[in-house]
Amino acid sequence: MVTRSIAVFAKSSMVTPGCEQMVQRIDINLSELRALRNRIDGHHLESDDWPIIDALVSKLIVRAESQQARMAAKVAAQRAADSSKEAASSQGASSDGASLDPASDPASSGPTTGDSASQAKPDEKKGHGRNGVAAFTNATHVNHALGPDVLGSLCEKCGPVRGGGRMSSYREKITIRIVGQPLFGAEIYHFEQARCKMCGNLIAADGSAEILEGIGSSYITYHWSACAMLLVMHYFAGAPFKRLETLHNGWGVPMPDANQWKMANDSTDLLIPLLRALEQYGIRNAVSLRIDDTGSEVISLRKQIRAEIAALEKIGESTNDVRTAINATGVYLETSDGAVITLFYTGRHHAGEIIDQLLKHRKSTEPKLAKVTDGASKNFDHQHADKLVEASCNAHAFLKFRAIKDKYPKEYATAGEVYKQVFDNDDEAKARGLTPIERMLYHREHSKPLMKQLKAMCDEKIESRLIEPNSLLWEPLTFIVNQWPRLTLFYQEPNVVLDTNVLEQALIIPVRYLAGSFNYKNTNGSDVGDLCMSLIATARANRVEPVAYLTHCLAHHEDLARRPEHYLPWVYRERHNE
């Protein structure tokens, strides 16, 4: 059995002046530690156990005190820096600072109070909760006309009475009928043929060339609409190929899972130019970027990871540097013209490396891109800090307080009140249609004092040293302190958003896929999934129905390869709304 010598902190029997604790090495192996653990569980400690326990507890005390001291020093340093900044800004208020005053800036003109804003809003009519006819964009319309002698005739109800009315045209009565049907329909075409008895020459009846449009063979062809439906059902709705096969066998339209994979794989080969166009357009024109990771699973990559670990263990090398995580990274880009691009990448990478991959397409002359993510250090581990304004997600900060609301209701209530007003301010800025600079100034006036209240509470708790590193409240407090410069960039820089909520919602797509299919077999499968999820999520974010959109793109794949920018979702939407 492998044994290790463990160094711990222990109180010395001879205390030197100015030093209450000193390092002492205690030789103890893992077997002895496990035996100690068993005696603790059984409440049968021996006299020789107490020095070891005392040393270990002393080490934890030293570590906690050190963390407290570091955080208190950090709070004091931040307060000093903030004071110097406020002093400098007050001295320069008559020059540069004056232009940032919302009251004097013409771009921020307009009502600033909540009452006046509410008066400016038009009265919103309360809905009845039903979908109108306009919502059924793909419905078949069937018209039922009145008889030829109805209009202009005497009313059957009041006609016999003297002065009875005549029937005139009135608004139509609408009934919407929802019918059930298989996801995929089948059409069988019968072609009469003639055959020469001498040479075997065959002549078949002529048929429309549209019959063979799609993926497949002359015997069975999957139309582009079927391919698009499959991509949406499998990669967005999360229905596994085998489940779709079972369903359709019951409907009398066989869809073997092997054929489904060929449909998906061949379709995405035709859509690759569109994905590349989306990536380049998004990163070149983006004003804000949200990015984050969620776990994924690729069988071939998992085997590769195990092989790397086994090879290192065989030669006695450390396996600590082997990257064992497989991530699905989501990227949410908003452009200056209002377009939204959602992209997914699956593999042995983290979000910072995806940022490096994307920013290669962004010119250094472009304005800095506002990036928002959670506080994980890997999301800031990249090589393009000079191209980014890097902020942290305020929703993540609040969720840390919400996780401990039962233990610390007062601190949770303070954070909740602050963030409710801050997010309400952001909604108000959107409702007014403020520009990014106007929104920043609005938050600077209304949200900055609120955020300072939250920071003051966190500083007071840490400086008082009443909250220790082992406390549940320690993580929320230190997150606010450590991430403070990034959390407050939304009122210091334009285009910095408050949170990554829309990205977290988009990451449900790969999570839902894995919940049904469990994994990808290899990287080719994950590449196909990433492409389909990216195109579908981007179409939905730009108010485009994905099945019709993908059907159109596949049907025109030759033109798409030549000019993919003509098939971007917002371009497609404008073209089809004309």
Image: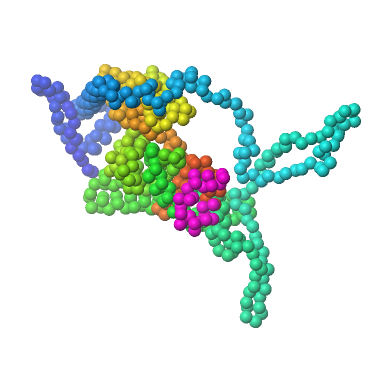
Q: Is residue 302 left or right of residue 138?
A: left
Query: In the image shown, does 180 or 240 lie closer to the viewer?
Result: 180
Q: Is residue 567 magenta?
A: yes
Q: Main secondary structure of the magenta part?
A: helix
Q: Position of residue 552 (x, y in %)?
A: 54, 52
Query: In the image shown, does 144 or 306 lie closer to the viewer?
Result: 144
Q: Is residue 304 magenta?
A: no
User: Which residue is at a point 52% across and 20% down the rendered structure image?
Assistant: 119
Q: Position of residue 531 (x, y in %)?
A: 44, 50
Question: Could one spot residue 397 in this view of the protein?
Answer: no
User: Which residue is at a point 84% across and 41% down the rendered structure image?
Assistant: 149
Q: Quadrant of residue 488?
A: top left
Highlighted range, magenta: 552-578
Question: Could one spot residue 298 in this view of the protein?
Answer: yes
Q: Quadrant of residue 142?
A: top right
User: Which residue is at a point 17% across and 35% down the rendered structure image?
Assistant: 27
Q: Is residue 416 left or right of residue 157?
A: left
